[in-house]
Image (tube, rainbow, N blue to C red):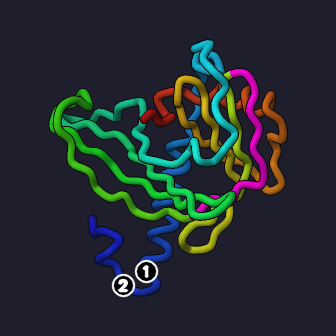
Amino acid sequence: MPTLSTLHGLARRPATALTVVAALALGACGGGGDDAPDGGSGGPTPSASIEALAGDWVQKGCVKTGGQSFKKMLRARVTGANTLYYAEGVLSFGGNGCEGASVLAGPSRLGTVSFDRSEANGGLAAHWGVFRTVTGTRFGAIWTLRSPPLLCLLGDEIPSIQPSLSAVSASLGTVPTDNCFVR
C-alpha cells in the first residue's frame, strides 16, 4: 500500500481525509465498559487548562494481529491560548503483547483543535471545541481528561450535542478505556 507521501497532488487529499476519518472512527468505537467515568481512581480533579492536554500520549489498549502488535501515539502541542496542534502515529511491536522495543511510524499532523470552553469537576475535565483537519474539514470534538491522567477523545457535533459534564461523563461510559491514551 502506498504511503501518503508517495501520492501526488489531489490524490493525497482524499487519502488523508480517509485516514483521518478511519482514525476517528476506530478511536470512537464504543462498546461499553464497567469503568467509572473517572477511572474509579478517586484521584484529584484533572485540570481544565489545555496545557494539561499537551505532550505525547500512548493508547492504553493493544491492537494484536498475527505476530505483531500496535498502539496509537498522540502528540498535542499548545499553539495558542485555546488551540492545539494534533498529530498521531503508530507504535509497532515485534511481539503480540505491545511489550519491549517499538518502532514509531509518524506522527503525522492531523490538524488543529480550537477549544471554545473547558470545565472540570470531580475526576473529569472536558474541553469542547472544533477539530479542523489538514484538509480544512471541521468536526466537533471533546477532549477529556480523567484521573489518573487518561485522555479520551469524543466526537461531537457543531454545536455540541454533549453540552454538559454529565453528558460527557455518560458518553465516556460507552468508551472502553483501552481506546484512550496514557502518558
Which residue is at the front of the view, 135 or 47? Answer: 47
Whole-percent x and y of residue 41? 57, 14
Q: Which residue is mark 1?
A: 11
Magenta residues, dominant SS class: strand
Q: Is residue 93 left or right of residue 81?
A: left
Secondary structure at numbered mark 2: loop
Q: Amino acid at mark 1?
A: Ala
**Residue range corresponding to the magenta coloring:** 112-122
Check residue 88 for magenta coloring. no
Q: Which mark is residue 8?
A: 2
Image height of 164 relative to 130, above or below:
above
- Dot 1 and dot 2 residues touching (CB under 8 Å): yes
Estimate the spatial distance between the alpha carbons at disc 1 and disc 2, rounded to whole Å: 6 Å
Q: Amino acid at mark 2?
A: His
Whole-percent x and y of residue 50? 63, 48
**How many numbered circles are shown?**
2
What is the crowding at mark 1: few (fewer than 14 residues within 10 Å), some, or many (at least 20)? few
Q: Is residue 157 left or right of residue 103?
A: right
Check residue 114 for magenta coloring. yes
Q: Is residue 134 left or right of residue 127?
A: left
Image height of 83 relative to 180, above or below:
below
Tell me what residue is drawn at x 63 percent, y 30 percent. Answer: 46
Q: Quadrant of the C terminus?
A: top left
Q: Quadrant of the N terminus?
A: bottom left
Tell me what residue is drawn at x 75 percent, y 44 percent. Answer: 118
Secondary structure at numbered mark 1: helix
Q: Residue furthest bottom?
A: 9
Residue 158 occupies quadrant = bottom right
Whole-percent x and y of residue 178? 46, 29
